[in-house]
Amino acid sequence: MSIDTEKRDTERDPVIVEPAVLERQGRLPRFAVPGGVVVAAAVAGGLLALTGFNIALWVLGTLVLFAVGLYAASRAVEGRRKATDRLVTVIVTAAFLLALLPLVSVLWTVVSNGLTRFDAEFFTSSMRGVVGEGGGVYHAVLGTLIITALAAVISIPIGLLTAVYLVEYGKNSRLARAITFFVDVMTGIPSIVAGLFAVALFTLLLGPGARLGFAGSVALSVLMIPIVVRATEEMLKIVPNELREAAFALGVPKWRTILKVVIPTSVAGIASGVTLAIARVIGETAPLLVAVGVTTGVNLNPFDGRMATLPVFSYFSYATPGVPREPYLDRAWAAALVLIIIVMVLNLLARLIARAFAPKTR
């Protein structure tokens, strides 16, 4: 074979060299990471013991010493690329744990304080005629569920139809751009503004001092509609256009294509987004405080009189306790725990709905 032929073969079939062949390095032992954490914690604790121990400084010092030590050891044994990868992994993990600390702290505080009144009486009694110990949140739980359900009935159809218009009909029209702008504005409005809007609306309709459960539902729907619109819009956008075109090619009208093809394809994400929107507004306090008010008895009619809700019940129990203070504070923490459990159940329900209605790939 000639030299020219060998040159052409080499250019046609280049040799692929793996990075590991170019840079042969060792590897740190498996116990390097846990051992490094233990050593860094011991060193940081020893240094702080000389000047005064502080748990926050101890955690920070452990993290810094561990990151520096692991990077140096990995740089010496494994090379620069692997050392950089390990350093970034440590930073990302530390950021995740730092973001998790407030959640863990809130859960621990609410659970430890709320379990004191987690008994049968708490869930079967109202506060009618109760002063001091006893009583419960039966009336507040029912009020929260009724008001939130009405808000969902108002918000879900409006949000779904708005999203369908923006994706399927409006496209880039002037009206669609205006709707998108106002949806963005509504997403960021403070919750108290929604409550004041409901109060002003029902003051015009029913007169001054009007406080009723339906007003709270209207206030929550103002906060819920933009979330439903955004969630539904994003789900509709990811439906492949090929599905629409295939239906159009078969002579299917556009409205039937949307109803039979587009929405069923994205129903998992839509249901998940709607459930998360409900979980988002169910804990709002400010709009319910100004639009619904507070009562100590059971009222199941959202169109007549004030209703009790869990957020407002917890707020008043903690902000204006009676004498002695302990029973009121225990009820406030227990109500907050019940609200967290409801939100957690709704989030789990959203995941189950998304999994149940997700398109089958097999």
Image (cartoon, rainbow, N blue to C red):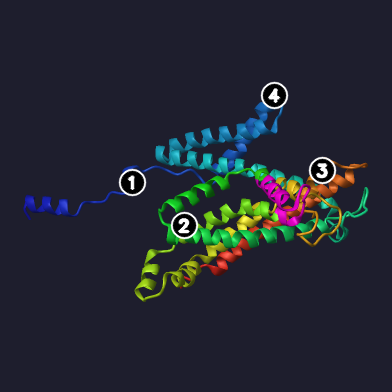
Side of 161 where 24 appears, left or right: left
Labels 2 and 4: the sequence-earlier one: 4
Location of residue 273 (image quadrant): bottom right
Decide: is 79 above or below 181. above
Q: Which residue is mark 3?
A: 318
Tell me where residue 219 appears, x and y as whole percent.
67, 51
Mark 4 to mark 3 CA distance (whole Å): 41 Å
Q: Earlier in the sequence, mark 2 or mark 3?
A: 2
Which structural element holds mark 1?
helix
Reading the image, the residue beneath label 4 is 50
Residue neighbourhood size for the residue with mark 1, other residues' Cα within 10 Å, grouped as few (<14), some (14–19), many (≥20) = few
Q: What is the magenta segment's predominant secondary structure?
A: helix
Secondary element at tag 4: helix
- Whether the magenta-drawn stretch holds residue 98 is answered as no
Q: Relative to residue 268, is residue 43 depicted above or below?
A: above
Separation of residues labelled 2 and 4 (CA atoms): 64 Å
Q: Which residues are magenta?
A: 194-216
